[in-house]
Amino acid sequence: MTAPPVDAAPGGQARSAPLIGRDAEPTIFEMSVPGRRAWSFPRTELPEWSAEELVPGAYLRPELLDLPEVSERDLVGHMTRLTHRQYSVDLGAYPLGSCTMKYNPKACDEAAGLPGLAGIHPSAPASLTQGWLELLWRLGDILCEITGMSAVTLQPPAGAAGELTGLLLMRAWHQAQGQGHRHKVLIPDSAHGTNPASVTLSGYDTVTIPTDHRGLLDMAALADRLDGAVAGIMLTNPNTLGLFEEDIVQIAQAVHRAGGLVYYDGANLNAILGVTRPGDMGFDIVHLNLHKTFAVPHGGGGPGAGPVAVSPRLAEFLPGPIPTRMDGGGFDWVTPPRSIGRVHSWHGNALALARAYTYILLNGGDGLRRVAEGAVLNARWLRQRLEGTYDSPFERPNLHEFVVSTATLKRKRGLRALDVAKRLLEEGFHAPTVYFPLIVAEALMIEPTETESPQTLEALASALLRIAKEDGEEAGKAPRTTPVGRVDEARAARRLIPTWDARERPIS
Amino acid sequence: MGHYVPHTDDELATMLATLGLTSLDELFDCIPAALRLAGGLELADGLSEPDTLAAVAELAGRNHGGLVCFAGAGAYDHGVPAAARALPFRSEFVTAYTPYQPEVAQGVLQALFEYQTMVARLAGLPIANASLYDGAAATVEAVNLASAATGRDTVWVSGGLHPHWRAALATFAAGSGHELVDIALRDGRTGWPEAGSGEKGVPGALVVASPNYLGCLEDLPAARSAADANGARLVVAADPVSAGLLRSPGSQGADVVVGEGQPFGTPLSFGGPYLGLFACRAEHVRRLPGRLVGETVDVEGRRAYVTTLRAREQDIRREKASSNVCTNQTLIAVCCMVQLAWLGTSGLRELALRCARGTRYAREALLAIPGVEPLVDAPVLREFAVRLPVDPVTVIERMAEEGFLAGVPVGLTDGVACDEGDGRNGLLVAVTERRTRAQIDAYAAALEKVMV
């Protein structure tokens, strides 16, 4: 069956999005007119001391700091026109593999905007912030239940920060066991780049484990590399190919036998919500990407939130302070006895945490399971629609995402993964992740998420199938309907212009 | 409940049939049966939207909002104009991913390019990145850069650095191997060791905050001299609001300038998401952490923007990357950019001036209270530390009943600022442009009352 289950217009395709004009938007600096202003400040009745009366002259800047001088109307016009040059989940489907670009419920925005949350100073004592502490404590408790772990820090502000926090926990634990000499962390060759980068920052060395013909971790290679110098292994499960590491229990046991810890990269947790838990698989440390799984919007690149949950034996090392329920029912901040220390200026990205908490309340345990089911169903269905047209490098059934390749299409007609990605933009969809994972040539990594309807999936499938019939030369001209065409990335690096002020003299 | 999975029961059945499956459970047959949760998660069932929002509002209602805020310590109660509240929260900015496809991400890319320009100007340096997590993270990254540039692990850290940022440096030093050496404050400002004394090792980096945690303006030329005497790089943690009045750190010799961008366009938010500002000299651009947006052209020669020098980043360079940062704080950077454009040249100066006026007025009002003394005596701009005759923790709780968030307890142990009591009863007080004369007068009167 190739038709969508029900014939209706796709709600997640953005081909109708209007884009007025084809000119570049001037920078805010070009709109500046000396003396124009948007600002106003409250009346305070304070003495109007001059700068010279307030600050010793040696500290005062000799000239004013140059910022754009614009009216509020022009500023609003500028920013609004910029939004018209920007794709987003709210505009259409965003099947960007590994990024879980699901719809972000508006109720979560509203919750995060509550003055009782957004207006609270982070240093205010616990007695004045019981609502915040309880919210964070509840969220931590829920995340432990979802992951099967026993304690959590909410401080890490992003996934990579969570990884580094988790690795420093690994390090502290080994040192406490008299195993400070261990220095190797095993990472599959399909892993996200943040994993090895975090390993380096933790002072450990990366050892790569290959992927086998199944698309899973090569068990023989693992056995070969396990020795007394191994501090642990970092895994994503399902892995970045969207495949469940079915040997996970044996992997965890083998690493534990060798004295190592097992780290779970939560990038792909959306696939298994309410179905299985990292803690039950044998993981010791788990980081979560609340901006993926729990619908915190990505904000054009951030902010996110990357809590780290651990098994009981690691709890005493967690960063602190941690919101804790005290005897008597009140909440207070408690720092674990052997804490590795702070990893954030304050309590983590608190409003992002509040959004995730709201999302979890909305869904509940029953709804989170439906999220995983919808995510896997959509990915499985879309993959089947593309079968026979795009190469499928691995045969196993995928979970929430899958990887296909244009290797055959490239050989036949010169159609590269990049061309498919750029053509898809013209079709009113964001592109999939391309050229990742690195172990698949001409990879397209597709994650439709659970929030796209069957009609949107069918429109996406139709577009991908149509594009696959094109030749590389023609597709290479795409995108032609976007605010700009393909950009000259080499020039950007060669003549570096990172600011408006560098235009006259690019940095080389 | 799963409100956001759109499939009807008929659609689910049809899609499953297409896959040759008869139930949703079969989707997970690739997961070993022993690992599958039998009874599901032990979580309550989902709630309706109104019930959910009521539950969150109930928690929010248990926080003491609405206090007149004199607390700072890196988180300031500045006004956020309607434009800065509205514009960055348009869907297109909020629900976009990292701009990996520049043809459909010119909005975010151009906003970041404009943000980078403004941050570079604030710092007085040519390069600024597209944001880091917060002030602490930016400081950690700056130390990593400076240490890599000099090949030396010893870091001199001014006792005036925010204690939480100092704590984060210590946490991450466990991995990087950096050796942190505290340099004590003398009379509120960093007392750098004499050149050639060798008493504190040979640093690769010096870290100093100005204004520092106690609000005092540091002697940056002296910090530069201390760095030069050791062949070290100078990292300055600067308050971006002060930039409206003060000489830029870059013009005074900073190699890297970091800061907390929260004062521009971000509410107090219980500490996050905030914004790590990061700027550096051009020679360090290839060690720059995080994303960098550059101007270029598209195939038709039109101006366009793209993330550039990507070979530094983790997804390309993996274990050899300059940093592991991927997700950053882009949306908060857009808030910052909008607020700075709203302020403009004259508004930024006016903002800093108004903070300084309120600070002078409040400091004089507090020091007029019997028993209240200055904690240190160096010049301040928009925050100051006083010594109370009683425990500041108790004072803050009592002042809440009077309608004020009185400040942040501050200690000074061996010349290093800390947030725990050292017996000196320090209170750190910040005054933003929002505080009126009437509020400050009432605050001083209440303080005198609760200390009796």
Image: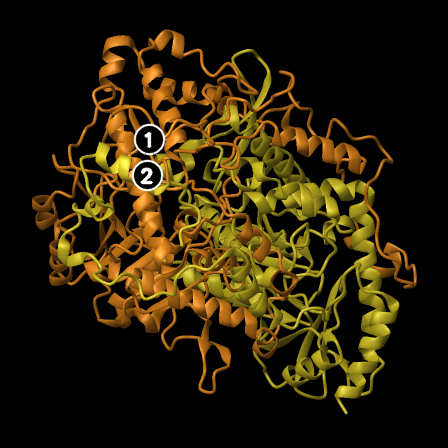
Chain colours: A orange, B yellow
x, y (%) of residue A111? 57, 57
Residue B318 has which mark? none
The residue to which callout 1 is attached is: A5
Count of all numbered marks drawn on residues in the image:
2
Q: Is residue A322 left or right of residue B401?
A: left
Residue B10 has which mark? 2
Q: Quadrant of the N terminus of chain A?
A: top left
Residue B255 visible, this orientation: no
* Res. A119 image quadrant: bottom right
Q: Classify 10 Å Cα crowding around label 2: few (below 14), some (14-19), many (20 and above).
A: few
x, y (%) of residue A57? 83, 54
Q: Say which amino acid is labelled 1.
A: Pro
- Residue A373 drawn above or below residue B396: above
Residue extending farthest to the bottom is B452
Residue B160 visible, this orientation: yes
Q: Say which amino acid is labelled 2.
A: Asp
Q: Is residue A45 left or right of residue A412?
A: right
User: Is disc 1 in contact with disc 2, using a CB cutoff of under 8 Å?
Assistant: yes
Report helix, strand or loop for mark 2. helix
